[in-house]
Amino acid sequence: MEYFLDAFKKYADFSGRSSRKAFWFYVLYYFVIGIILALGDMALDTTILSISYGILMLMPTLSLCTRRLHYA
């Protein structure tokens, strides 16, 4: 869970590198939380949880992907 929370601490940091392990644990937690929220949306017959989660996670995901793909 620390890798997922670390992405929030560095959400505006596009410099540096992130490890392969940090990237894949982030992806794992991202999808697990997304599935849970999608099930909640299905139960409530709405899409507000999934849309809010997607918007909230856009910047941390972009910064993590940029740091993972950084060369040097």
Image: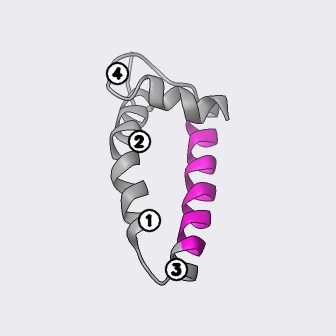
Residue 27 magenta: yes
Determine the CA span between mark 2 and mark 1. Answer: 15 Å
Disc 1 marks a residue whose amino acid type is: Ser
Disc 4 marks a residue whose amino acid type is: Asp
Q: Earlier in the sequence, mark 3 or mark 4?
A: 4
- For the residues bearing labels 1 and 4, Cβ distance under 8 angstroms: no
The crowd level at tag 2 (other Cα within 10 Å; few <14, some 14-19, many 20+) is many
Choose top left, top right, bottom left or bottom right for residue 26: top right
Q: Earlier in the sequence, mark 1 or mark 4?
A: 4
Residue on which the image places disc 3: 44
Determine the CA span between mark 4 and mark 2. Answer: 11 Å
Outermost front residue: 44
Residue on which the image places disc 1: 50
**Residue at position x 54%, y 71% in the image:** 38
Choose top left, top right, bottom left or bottom right for residue 25: top right
The nearer-to-camera label among 3 and 4 is 3
Disc 3 marks a residue whose amino acid type is: Leu
Report the magenta residues as a range.
Answer: 23-40
The nearer-to-camera label among 3 and 2 is 3
Q: Secondary structure at mark 1?
A: helix
SS assignment for the magenta stretch, majority? helix
Relative height, residue 57 to residue 51 (above, below): above
Disc 2 marks a residue whose amino acid type is: Thr
Determine the CA span between mark 1 and mark 4. Answer: 25 Å
Determine the CA span between mark 3 and mark 4. Answer: 36 Å
Image quarter hosting the N terminus? top right
Q: Earlier in the sequence, mark 4 or mark 2?
A: 4
